[in-house]
Amino acid sequence: MGFAALEMNAELALTAEVFGLLSGIFFIGYFFFEIPSNMIMHKVGARLWIARIMISWGIIVILTGFVQNATHLYILRFLLGVAEAGFFPGIILYLTYWFLKSERSKATAILILALPIGGLIGAPVSTWIIDHVTWANLSGWRWMFILEGIPALILGVIVLFYLTNRPQEAKWLTVEEKNWIEQQLEEERIASSKINKPTKREMLKDLTVWKLSAFYFAAYTAIYGLSFWIPTIIKSLSEIHTTNFEIGWLSMLPSLVAIPAALFVGWNADRTGKLKKHLMICLTIAVVGFIGCAVSTTVAPMVIFLSLTSIGLYGFTGCFFAYLTFFFTESTAPVGIALVNSFAALGGFVGPTILGMFNLTSGMFLLAGILVIGIFILMTMKRTHENIA
């Protein structure tokens, strides 16, 4: 959507406010269907459900290339949220079936690398398609949606045939290896059940869960408030002759610096066991980045501060989802993880809308302020595990 906006907004006569709402309405569908989706995945298995998610979202992305007005976009963006609901929390839940707590920050950080790597690939590819692919008299932004929806369909089919639900089903592990993994995970589950709320009802009454939701809402608002608007922000500060492809290359830089940041934070958080401190440092870096973006008036400092913001936000994300899993038992994890993520997903609606309603300076300061509130919420979280200090 961020790259499509470079041409789509003018062709469909979309205002900044409408584009902000279109970017965010995805998360409304995501919010309502995330918990049911995660519960279904826990019952039917990751292989079948992740494949369903990917295939349906690929179809909807392809259809987005044929929209004729804002109403069509509203409908498809909402349906995309419904289709994709449960994917990310489902993958986080899936990792708990395979990785011990001491490995989870690294594992999650590697998963999160998909985001900046997707940015590295998607930025130049998307803008190149927009500038050069106009087959059948369709605009380049339409072909961007069509062509980039196809990999989700293909990978969805691959998942259906090759993803392994649990270690006990893994053909590449020996019996001894399967038993060892399951034994270690079971010991952690037993220990977790003695610390955390054992039932979904009690979990919902736990203030900690709602603090996690509020904290991640703040971070999610900042993450998606920024990500949808990066190309437009860079274009607004660029010279008039700057091409979409050049904007795509500039948009790569925040993703590029985010890769080592995510890996380092995940590795160091597991090494030191200080997940909470890592989260606070990452968000503080992001706050500084947003403030820098707010006062930048040319491309060079803007890209530098966007990169600093990405370091903080991507470093935060991998660490947070490892931190999150420590607060749930095996029975409450499907609902708990989805609950935190679904309420936070409302920030995906709020963030893009903020930058659509306010000017760049005010919007960036507002996102920085929301992150500061998130830091204060994190400070109130009581330590319940030795390794999440």
Image (cartoon, rainbow, N blue to C red):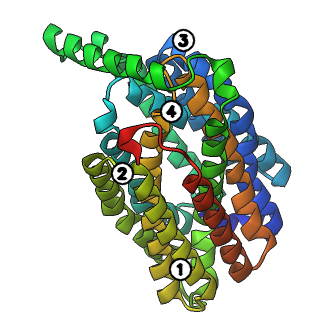
Find the distance from the CA under tag 1 to the CA under tag 2.
44 Å
Q: Nearer the viewer, residue 120 or 257?
A: 257
Is 175 above or below relative to 263? above
Please give the residue where the numbered disc 4 appears in the rendered image.
327
Q: Residue 360, percent across and down?
A: 70, 79
Q: Nearer the viewer, mark 4 or mark 3?
A: 4
Q: Quadrant of the N terminus?
A: bottom right
- Nearer to the camera, 20 or 268: 268
Q: Is residue 383 left or right of residue 3?
A: left
Whether residues under marks 4 and 3 lie with C-beta atoms below 8 angstroms apart, the answer is: no
Q: CA distance from mark 2 to mark 3?
A: 33 Å
Q: CA distance from mark 2 to mark 4?
A: 15 Å
Label placed on residue 243: 1
Please give the name of the residue rendered at 40% of the width and 44% of the height, measured from the top-left corner: 388
Image depth: mark 1 or mark 2 in front: 2
> Is 168 situated left or right of 108 in this image?
left
Image position, residue 338 (x, y; %) = 60, 32
Residue 43 badge: 3
